[in-house]
């Protein structure tokens, strides 16, 4: 599951130190414990599992907060739903954040196609989330722009089935193969509305703590990572 672009490796150690410090403070505050710095050190040294317990508790609290945000802002996640596969009016909704250069996303694509083929009441809303560099951004722009020529699904399918890092030449070849006016596509790729749609996906992903691609929202629950058709269907059928 590729990580979001903004999670730069050079900041990992620094951020980890901050997380650990804040985690301890929050954990102790939650448990109504007031400790000085020496007490915190003593607390950690008493049991090597204490740090794990702190981080686990913070992780649970964070996930709970993200879950609440999915419920609160769910209507925002199902907007721009013209970018979809399956039944336009399907009542069972799967939302996928994906990247065209993501190998796990490519593996999930056939599972999604089987899901909508076998279940006519399912709609999969696609959220372009290019996190693997400029090639991914280029591909997402091409896919979004292809909607202007009513070729989004064909472009999406071709990009998902493409091997290797996607280039502008790949996009040109695909355009010719599926009957897209390439010059118009290039123009539409750089329009503000195209860029804004990608930025909106970044915002929504950050809102609920999406760390990489693919990530799914099914039954208003966040499922990070690639999952199979049967698991998706099981979650869709679980109304609890």
Image: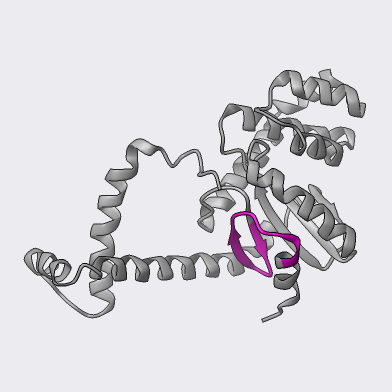
**Seen in the image, is 179 located left or right of residue 232?**
right
Instruction: Pinpoint residue 151: horizontal percent, then vertical percent.
Output: 87, 36
Q: Quadrant of the C terminus?
A: bottom right
**Seen in the image, is 161 located left or right of residue 73?**
right
Residue at figure coordinates x 70%, y 31% from the top left: 139
Asked if 11 appears above or below 92 in the picture, the reply is above
Instruction: Pinpoint residue 162: horizontal percent, then vertical percent.
Output: 75, 32
Q: Is residue 60 visible?
A: yes
**Seen in the image, is 102 located left or right of residue 29?**
right
Instruction: Pinpoint residue 215: horizontal percent, then vertical percent.
Output: 61, 54
Q: Is residue 95 magenta?
A: no
Q: Which residues are magenta?
A: 216-230
Residue at figure coordinates x 82%, y 60% from the top left: 115
Who is closer to the viewer here, 236 or 61?
236
- Quadrant in the picture for residue 114: bottom right
Asked if 223 appears above or below 235 in the picture, the reply is above
Asked if 89 appears above or below 137 in the picture, the reply is below
- Quadrant in the picture for residue 111: bottom right
Residue at figure coordinates x 15%, y 75% from the top left: 34
Who is closer to the viewer here, 190 or 39?
39
Q: Is residue 221 magenta?
A: yes
Q: How is the protein colored in the picture?
A: one colour
Instruction: Pinpoint residue 74: horizontal percent, then vertical percent.
Output: 65, 64
**Seen in the image, is 240 located left or right of residue 14?**
right
Residue at figure coordinates x 65%, y 27% from the top left: 165
């Amino acid at each position: 599951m590729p990580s979001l672009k903004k999670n730069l490796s050079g900041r990992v150690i620094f951020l980890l130190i901050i997380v650990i410090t804040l985690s301890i403070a929050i954990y102790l505050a939650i448990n109504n414990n007031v400790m000085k710095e020496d007490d915190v050190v003593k607390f950690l040294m008493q049991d090597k599992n204490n740090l794990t317990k702190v981080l686990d508790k913070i992780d649970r609290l964070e996930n709970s907060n993200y879950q609440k945000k999915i419920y609160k802002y769910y209507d925002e996640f199902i907007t721009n739903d013209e970018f979809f596969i399956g039944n336009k009016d399907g009542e069972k909704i799967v939302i996928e954040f994906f990247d065209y250069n993501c190998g796990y996303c490519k593996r999930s694509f056939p599972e999604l196609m089987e899901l909508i083929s076998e279940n006519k009441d399912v709609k999969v809303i696609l959220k372009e989330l290019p996190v693997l560099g400029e090639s991914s951004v280029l591909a997402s722009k091409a896919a979004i722009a292809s909607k202007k020529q009513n070729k989004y699904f064909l472009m999406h399918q071709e990009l998902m089935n493409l091997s290797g890092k996607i280039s502008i030449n790949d996009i040109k070849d695909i355009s010719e193969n599926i009957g897209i006016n390439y010059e118009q596509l290039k123009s539409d790729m750089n329009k503000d509305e195209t860029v804004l749609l990608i930025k909106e996906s970044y915002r929504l992903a950050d809102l609920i703590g999406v760390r990489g691609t693919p990530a799914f929202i099914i039954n208003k629950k966040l499922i990070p990572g690639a999952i199979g058709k049967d698991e998706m269907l099981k979650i869709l059928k679980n109304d609890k």
